[in-house]
Amino acid sequence: RAEQACLKYYGKIPVKKAMITGGEPALDRDYLLALVKGLKKKGFEEIVLMSNGYEIGREENYASDLVEAGLTEAHIDIKAFSEDIHIWYTGKSNKPVLNAVRMLNDTGIELLIQTVYMPGIVDCEEIEQIAIFLSSLNRNIKYRINPFAPTFAFEKVSRRPTIEEMEHAYEIASKHLPNAIISRSCYREYPTPPPQEAWITVYPDLTFKRRTMKDQEEDRISWLSHSRSKPREEILHELTLKRDDFEYRQKLEQVIRSIYPASSNPGSNKKPRESTR
């Protein structure tokens, strides 16, 4: 399907990076392994998996089998280091998740860990514990800290962290991990390639579509409209009123640029690439 999508939109297959996301793609082991093998066979040079890690950590050889199939990079969410907080957050233990990180690190592939900063729940103390755990495995693991976005939350469980809190979280994490970063969004690339402007999404039913950030925003609006049982126009009005969200993103962007100036970004002169996900 990825090949057909490339042929439809480009007339050839210039895309060399595939990102497998969900839902949770690791739930179906056989399908995921077959997909990774198929992408490798088609010539994809970078095959990236975004996962919560839970299923990978429950099966002894899952991580190594993925790498053997052709996986080159994994992005894993560690939602909390404290098991009690993780169970409250997800209903499940975090032991399989931590085990998945260990096993994936042992394979030697690129590994990026993500945590959402939720003041009062997953805060600097939790983030430091995660950073210490990761550094005990490999100090070169990339670690991204994302701010909690209450706009898209089902319940008011926490608030958005302040810019100063995000900076402090970065300072704490970077003491243990030199490749820590704070991010305004899960779509902001690590300081290698610049942010992607477009991608091809292949859905579970094997349909596909070329998408942009505009499409992503429309999906969010539709999801909010459905989950809150409100018309689209009302959701748009509510989002328009949240001017501080835009200003917050601008300020966080300035902080990111101060930490990672363009001159130090090895991918700063590269053109945005497209990926299949």
Image (tube, rainbow, N blue to C red):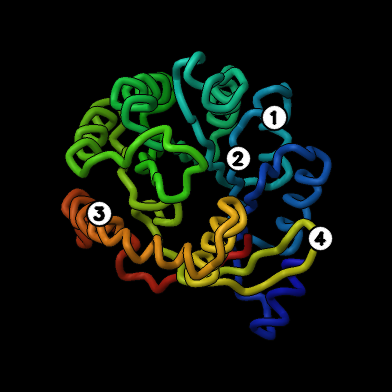
Q: Which mark is residue 205?
A: 4
- Residue pictured at 68% horizontal, 32% vertical: 64
Q: x%, y% of residue 210?
A: 62, 74
Question: Which amino acid type is marked by label 2?
Answer: Ser
Q: x%, y% of residue 16?
A: 60, 65
Dot 2: within a 10 Å radius of its alpha carbon, few (fewer than 14), some, or many (20 or more) residues?
A: many
Nearest to N terminus: mark 4 or mark 1: 1
Nearest to N terminus: mark 3 or mark 1: 1
Q: Which mark is residue 51?
A: 2
Between the C-alphas of marks 2 and 3, the distance is: 27 Å
The quadrant of the image that shows the N terminus is bottom right
Query: Which label lies toward us, 3 or 4?
Result: 3
Nearest to N terminus: mark 3 or mark 4: 4
Mark 3 highlights which residue? 248
103 vs 113: above or below: above
Please give left or right for residue 124 compared with residue 110 in the image.
left
Dot 1: within a 10 Å radius of its alpha carbon, few (fewer than 14), some, or many (20 or more) residues?
A: some
Q: Which mark is residue 55?
A: 1
- Residue pictured at 27% horizontal, 62% vertical: 243
